[in-house]
Amino acid sequence: MTDQQNKVLQPQVFYTLPLRDVVLFPHMTTTILVGREKSVKGVEEAKRAKMPIFAIAQTNPDTDTFDEKSIHNIGVLCSIIESTRMADGTLKVIIQGLMRAKIVKILPSPDYFVCAVEAIADANFAIENKELLGLIKGCVENFSKLAEFNKKITAEVISTLSKIKSPFDIVNLIATYLSSAVEFKQKILAENDLGKKLYQTLELIKTDIEISQTEAKISKSIQEKVTKAQKDFYLNEQLKQIKKELGQDEENEVAELKEKIAKLKLPKEVSEKCKNEIKKLEKMNPYASESGVIRNYLDWVISLPWSEQSKPNNSFKKASEILDKNHYGLKKIKERILEFIAVQMKTKDLKGPILCFVGAPGVGKTSFAHSIAQALNRKYTKVSLGGVRDESEIRGHRRTYIGSMPGRILQSMRKAKTTNPLMLLDEIDKMSYDLRGDPSSALLEVLDPEQNINFSDHYLEVDYDLSKVMFIATANNIAGIPVPLRDRMEIIKLSGYTEDEKMHIAKGHLIEKQRKETGLKKDEFKIDDAAILELIRCYTFEAGVRNLNREISKLARKATKEIVMKNMKSVHIKVDNLHKYLGPEKFHYGMAHKQDTVGVTTGLAYTEYGGDLLDIEVLKFEGAGKIQITGKLGEVMKESAQAALSYVRSIAGEMKIDAKKFSKYDFHIHVPEGATPKDGPSAGVAICVSLASVISGKAVRKDVAMTGEISLSGAVHEIGGLKEKLLAALRGGIKTVLIPMRNKKDLEEMPQEVLDQLVIKPIGHVREALKECLVDKKLERVIKKTDGRIKVAPKAKKKPRK
């Protein structure tokens, strides 16, 4: 340790030299220019007094202030080797770092920058530490690799580095030559732990290597492009002369484009745009990259339909036949299409409606849209929107980008080749958005009848008329469609099929379809009605018929295999042999309970696969009035359980229940199939009945199912998915279903088989459900013992007051 270092072991006051964009390191010699008056005076005074000067980096190089916020906390004590006054008044100073130091206090001074600092000694380290040795080796090797790109790192610097034994000095030398930002170098200087210091240094070296390699690669690429451009120009000129000799002129291509554009019935704006583009093309070198962009643009304009239309179908009978042939049921949508044909006949206007089919997977949304196109004699084109997250997918890319092209809307119009196709926007609820824009916002213009007459595509740069297009969107969940977009469409809900409807579809469409696909004749492949019903109930669980079609396809393939391999004349599928072909049952649908049970209520659930029965189980046991809820329930369902318990407690007096019981027992509410997430408020009535049953000891009727949201006052509110829930109740052997009074209007659209086979009771209050569902088992036993005769004890006479 030198004499100057010994002098600063204790906190002392030093003249301070704030540095802009420079970080000094111990034992490194650096030349700097000092311009600020206070800094110049401080250097000169420190040199005169033969004492070190404290050099420290500024946090903001653009400021002249000197306070705790404007400078870093740790710097380097330096000895002044030489200082020289320059002609412009600045001071050229050569300084050498001695050791790190930390600011204790900034002292005010009118003439100098002065700080009280405390020296920081380097920490001890174990040279036998393998991790440290590995880091040191990595730093030295990578620094030598960096020297290939950085001319400042000379062979002399590498030689000096190889002779240094102290790992701290190795870090100091390397960090001095790195081109990293001040904050990263300052972080290395401030770090006390040798391992972390070496690791940070290695990271910065590798970053510098990557940047240098990238710069070299870019430089080489530019040089190659310049050389290639010169070569291409020379070859193109030769090719041009050869084509002239052969009589193949580029002017023929331009003339051909002009002729094609003249034949099109283009709007005035589009025609002017094409003429301007052709003028640019005529003046341009045919081998320039821009000429290719213009040709592609003109090809797109020529290929788009501008006036071509398909002849509309104005026959009700033909349209009905096509729709009925391809799809069973769906009366509401078929009626809407016939209404459109009637309006079209009356107004002679081809302006298309904008519809949105919402329903579970497999109910026939996409296939029905194709049938509508056939019925209306329109070209069918499909745009798949699932997973689209870029606005340019709808509006197209601007021509400034390489490989740009129009959006999916105009691409579909090009495929349709008419101005009035039926365009299916499939899975419109599956779109998302990111930093590249929101495609659903771009669709607002497409689906707005007032705006789509002048649809603007970024690539086309002129307005395109979409008003004659019939748009049909499909979605599984209406909540996934943004409200402004939803407002522009006519929502038509496709509910799940009943068992009877699935039976008709299987017999009338699916079985015949699979016969054709597998080459079977009618007498070679048959399925009994009972087997079809078993297929529907035990091998599929869905609102639509997609999986049913898949299972029938499997049966048809196995039947074909047996006929070919075993020389069988026919295969007849029955309930008895269904297991042989399809294996064990895949699904077990919810069934009504076999007996009345205390605390167990049958609720109704609506899923994306249709409806199902949902058991609500409640237990009570001694405790302190707490409630436990299990079964992977969502927040809304948990809140419904809390509301149900609060309501039951509030009517304890009416039910002749001791209110103190609620404080003596804990309640456990469980919904089976715990691995399946469940949520929604529609189980409120069922939870309320289960709680009332378990606290009163009265059993719940086994043949009653219920659905409805409840309020704290006991009012029953409207729910969704009523058709699917009623179908599940019918399938499960339920006889009576309690529904909210406000859902009574939905019964008008229910299938007749549901209304005929179920007793549906609308209720407006939970009291009605309690009255309908709870059964007093004790009373029933008394009635059985007395052969139906019940003796009622006379009321005790009141004693007169004295």
Image (cartoon, helix red, strand yellow):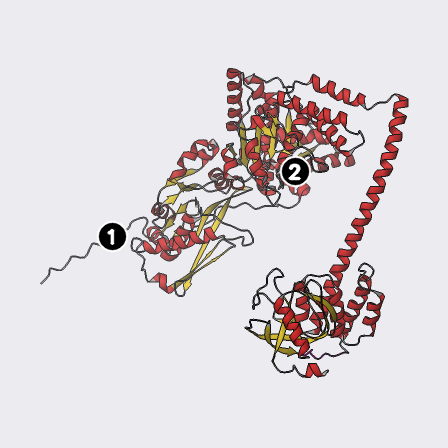
Q: Which mark is residue 318?
A: none
Tag 2 secondary structure: helix
The answer to whether residue 364 of the structure is visible from this angle is no
Q: Is the magenta region chiefly helix, strand or loop?
A: loop
Check the image and report above or below for 311 versus 759. above
Q: Which mark is residue 792?
A: 1
> Is residue 273 shown left or right of residue 737?
right
The residue where tag 2 is placed is 550
Q: Are marks 2 and 1 in contact (CB under 8 Å)?
A: no
Question: Quick one: label 2 or label 1, which is nearer the N terminus?
Answer: 2
The quadrant holding residue 248 is top right
Q: Position of residue 463 (x, y in %)?
A: 60, 27
Q: Position of residue 88 (x, y in %)?
A: 69, 62
Choose between 666 and 780: the one closer to the eye: 666
Tell me the mark number nearer the camera, choosing from 2 and 1: 2
The answer to whether residue 57 of the structure is visible from this angle is yes
Kindly identify the residue that appears in the image at 60 percent across and 33 percent down.
425
Choose between 104 and 360: the one closer to the eye: 104
Tag 1 secondary structure: loop
